[in-house]
Image (spheres, coloured by chain):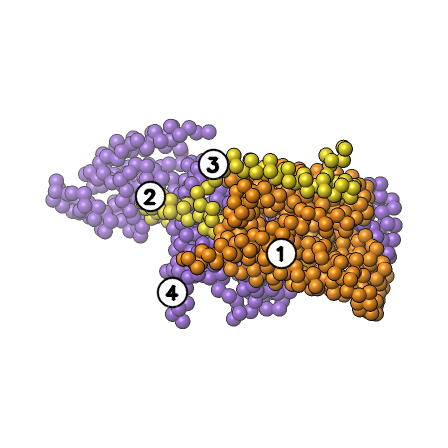
Chain colours: A purple, B orange, C yellow
Amino acid sequence: MVQKIQLEHHYDYILSSDVSEDLAHFKTIFDNCIDIKFREFVIHGARKGALVFLSGLVNIQTIDFEIMKPLVESDERLFQDSGSGFNDDSMKHLIENRLLFSSQLSWFDEFSDVVEHILSGNVAFLIDGLKQVLIINAKHWDKRAVDEPATEAVIRGPREGFQETISTNISLIRRRLKTPQLKMEDMIAGRLSNTQIVITYLDGIVDKKLVDEVKKRIGKIKIDAILESGYVEELIEDNSFSLFPQVLITERPDRVVGNLLEGKVGIIIDNTPFVIIVPGTFFQLLQSPEDYYQRYFIASAIRMLRFFAVLFSLLLPSLYIALTTYHQEMIPTMLLISIAASRETVPFPAFIEALVMEIAFESLREAGVRLPRPVGQAVSIVGGLVIGQAAVEAGIVSSPLVIVVSMTGIASFIFPSFQLGLAFRLLRFPMMVAAATFGLYGILMMLLLLLIHMLRLHSFGVPYLTPMAPLRISGLKDVIIRANWPKQSSHAEELKSQRYHNPFKRLRQRQNR
Amino acid sequence: MEIISRHQLLTISIIYQIGTTIIFGFAAGAGRDSWLAVLISTFFGTAVVWIYTRITHFNPGLTYIECYPAQFGKVLGTPIAWMHPLLFLYISGRIVADIKNLVPTTILPGTPPWVILLFFMLVISYGLYSGIEVMGKLTEIILPIILLIYLLEVILIFSSGVVHFDNLAPLLDKGWGRIWEVVWPLGIIQSFGESLALALVWTSMNERKSVGRTMIISSLFAGVFISFTDALAVSVFGEEIFKRATYPMYALIQAISVSDFITQLDATGVIYFCFMAFLKTYIYLFATIRSLQKLTYSKSSRIYIFPVVIIALFLGLTMAPNVVEHIAVVQKVIPYNPIYLSLMFVFPILLFVVSWIRNKISTATS
Amino acid sequence: MRDYIWPWQSNVMLKHPWALPILFLILSVILSFVTWSRSKHAPQGQGQEQQQQPHDMQQEQREGNSQESMDTSENEELKTML
């Protein structure tokens, strides 16, 4: 772990107007960094200058043709004007306007800023006689093509997903909201990684207090490096110990834009395609953007199916265990006979059976993630079918249980948010234990425990189970079914009225209509 | 301090007042006229509940417990106030004993009762720790589910073909005597006098003025609900069985048998009951810890959660060795017990009168 | 005699129904002394139930506003290059 003292030591350097001195400082800092390049030059035999850049992050063409070429081919007379009377401003003016071809330039006089810009992929231009350093944007590196998001595929809808480069991600959002109201503010977090974080929101719809709260929480992050949005998520969440995610994570720009229109705030983090949206409530995590692209009835039906899937993925194995162990009389007689017949050969009680199958299923699923794509599909299918069938024939598990476990697995794939799916997958196990020890009573108590826990959660001031918990009938329209476009309530206004102490505000835009 | 909305208070009190009558039946002693007895009890009970709400209205800002020392003076009022948490603790012990007698005998025969109750108390502690606001939201979500399940149950009962409405007639052939026997005092104590515990929740509500109206709506609704269930039970079983059954409503669920497919749904009835009992116990224990907090001027009620829960568990475990004695206490002892009568009727009426007079004087002089 | 220790039990309540009320009376008088001794901890005004609002967010945001303006001034220079 790098100690703080070592890091800040470098930044004691001060820029001077002597290029050789500055270059010596840079070379000391970037000692043993072979990818930092220094290009020293002399302009028309009179002035010394140098370029410092990171070769992997800059566009060599830009340096060659837009910086070095005009410098070398420049008119001699430019630099001989009034000799000693050449002050800083006229020099700067000369360089910016008559020499370089770049579209983004900026002058900096802090050593640490220059270092950070070099590390971000910009070119530092030092010139003798000038204390300040010019930073030229020449960023270029290999990046992934904009492709369909791996974790959130839809049937109907755009197939663009976020990338690891933050400028690409921002442009993907910009294209969908061509309004100056879309604001992007940036922050830096992570002591060693200096990761750029961009906060985006729609001015006029979002609640300003929410934006301030987000900025405050991100500002409080004290960590060495931010490698993925998961770090940020954990550090800004209300309750990071809970199983339930309190923010929304997505790879799709259309989903981000949809949420921005509802008055939420998006947090884009460099080097990861996953964007965080706050605040996230439970029912939002169950929504898929495809709901809005499909037809009204179909979308509503699918939404209701999703609700049942939630219940199934949590309760089905537990109900099976509870009913077969404690309450056999509740099962209709014919079904009971067939279940009993198939369980005849099984040596284990229902709980152990179910536990073994569930663990096997989870292991298969986890293994399927690591395998390369073509192989992974085959193995999952083969694993599921063959192992299940073989287990039944060997008499280790009973076939009704295989059906139960596979239905549970299918139900857990329906979650649009894989984080929430993970939470419910995990919750199945304590539920099974409770069912095995206390039957239906155990299931009831566990459900109550779970509900109480979910009701305690807040996400940036909004209760987690809104709009069901503080019951807002107008909000329910969008939860159970998907309301028709004309009938949808204004989400932004609703989100505001859901926060504790925020009075209902009329938006300027809407009044204009 | 947590805040609950009017709707949340409504759902809490509906579930609370329907409460354990789901299994035990209400006014069973009146036989086939029990539904009428229930309606009459509702009428008087709602008036009693209204008196409780008026007391808190006349003493703005104070919880019900604090009204006693405030109006009767510290020397007389404080002991009376202290009797309330003790009473609430005792009643919650009774409910715990109810579960102890019901669950092991019906759905979990092999499990030792103390484990069942321990789990129960654990969930209650978590609820107490989370505060009344969370409970309000919980009941908001679950009340529609409960009503839906009840509707389903009624439909299933009707489809089982066991309902015989002629069991309800002839009406009042045994006279009004046994109706009055049941209405006073047991009928009014049972769901309405017990709403006293809800009084400690009222100060958490955000709109003080609608407490009275909300409670009246809830009491009337609960009363009609119970009356309907009673009528249904009598029409299925007939008078004699209804009077003698230990768990009349539970027997109702046992009677469901639709085309030989949906039968023996006893466990659902027990689960239904467990949830009602959960909420009732929660409200009693919440009332207890809040009274304790107020009476000892503590900053937060959380430190009392652990001891109160342990005491309630202990009371419940040791209270009744079998269900017959337990129910005998309800029918024979409680109606004449001076604690119930004084705390639920005598003292509130006195308090009401005193608060009203003082309120009149202060508004007249100001 | 031993019954009097367990006055809440159903058998005791059936045989000596007055045992529980007496217990309550004794306990409440004893506990009133507790209240009396803790009365110095009493809050100033008793009618404080209704005024509390979830005030943490408001306070936090007032503090957060002043801090946030400091942060943005530091970040201004670094913001430019994309």
Tag in front: 4 or 3? 3
Among the two numbered marks 2 and 3 on one chain, the one whose residue lies closer to the N terminus: 3
- Residue denoted by label 1: B13
Q: Residue at x 75, y 58 (%)?
A: B182
The residue identified by callout 2 is C70
- What label sits on residue B82 in the rendered view? none
| Residue type indicated by callout 3 | Lys
**What label does residue A508 carry, if any?**
4
Q: Which residue is mark 3?
A: C40
The reply to whether discs 4 and 3 touch (Cβ–Cβ < 8 Å) is: no
> Mark 2 to mark 4: distance in Å?
29 Å
Q: Is residue A432 left or right of residue A181?
A: right
Residue A179 in the image: x percent, y percent? 39, 62
Label 4 and label 1: CA atoms lie apart by 42 Å
**Crowd rating for badge 1 (residues with CA inside 10 Å; few <14, some 14–19, many 20+):** many
Q: Position of residue B111 (x, y in %)?
A: 79, 41
Q: Callout 2: residue from which chain?
A: C
The residue that appears at 64% across and 53% down in the rendered structure is: B345
- Asked which secondary structure carries label 2, the reply is helix
Residue type at numbered disc 4: Arg
Categorize mark 4 by other alpha carbons within 10 Å: few (<14), some (14-19), many (20+): few
Distance from Cα at disc 4 to Cα at disc 3: 54 Å
Subunit that carries the residue with mark 1: B
Front: mark 1 or 2: 1
Type of amino acid under label 2 = Met
Side of A298 relative to B273 (left or right): left
Where does the image place residue A498, in percent across and percent down from the top left?
49, 57
> Residue at the spot x=78%, y=62% of the render?
B177
Both on one chain, marks 1 and 3?
A: no
Q: Check the residue under mark 4 and report the chain it is in.
A: A
